[in-house]
Image (cartoon, helix red, strand yellow):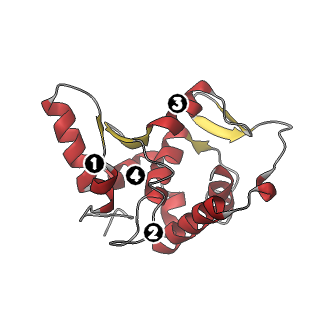
Amino acid sequence: MLRLFEEWRDDHRITEGKPLSKLTVLKLLFLTAAPKKDKGDDLLEIFDNFYAMPYGPVESDVYNVIQANTLPSYVAEYKTIKRREGGVDNSSDYVGSEFENIRNAVKALRAKNDHLIELNAFELVAITHRWDSWNRAMDFAEFMGQLSAKMPIDSIRKDSNKRFSLTD
């Protein structure tokens, strides 16, 4: 998915070649995984461990891999994720239905709002903060005196306030 985000980024002159921040990647992952329309396709069987956190939804398993800096072809630095120096690009080896589902989900997100890739991380946070599923989970976390709470897949799928831009 990171390779697909890079391709998307490089299709826009304003962002071409700029490193992707960790926060940007985590917000784009949520928006990619979530259904784009009611009862639409999603990636929530693959990315199934979202938590509502102060800066929006975070897929906990992916977050942990990023924090441990164990991505196979990428290095996670202080705030950014970039391709490893001398790393092998084996993205052409990715085949099969799971990868096609991911490729299709990124395409669907681009179709929904191709300019998302141009937004900074905090603009993406603002978009995800408009989702009811995030707000309900954060309200529950606050009630429990915690900083995060699990976002049930069903809640994300049935969210009546799906947003993919700052203005919709």
Do the residues bearing badges 1 and 2 touch, measured as CB atoms within 8 Å? no
| Mark in the foreground, 3 or 2 | 2
| Mark in the foreground, 1 or 2 | 2
| Mark in the foreground, 4 or 2 | 2
Where residue 41 is drawn, which disc sits there?
2
What's the residue type where badge 2 is placed?
Asp
Q: Which residue is mark 4?
A: 123
| Nearer to me, 33 or 125 | 33
As measured in the structure, the alpha-carbon distance from the residue carrying label 3 to the one carrying label 1 is 20 Å
Image-based side of 155 in relation to 49, left or right: left
Residue 160 visible somewhere in the drawing = yes
Of the residues under marks 1 and 4, which one precedes in the sequence? 4
* Picture residue at 47% right of the left edge, 57% below the top: 33
Image-based side of 81 in relation to 63, left or right: right
132 up-or-down from 26: above or below: below
Q: Residue furthest left?
A: 143
The part of the image, by quadrant, that contains residue 104 is bottom right
Q: In the image, residue 152 lies at what x, y percent?
A: 30, 47
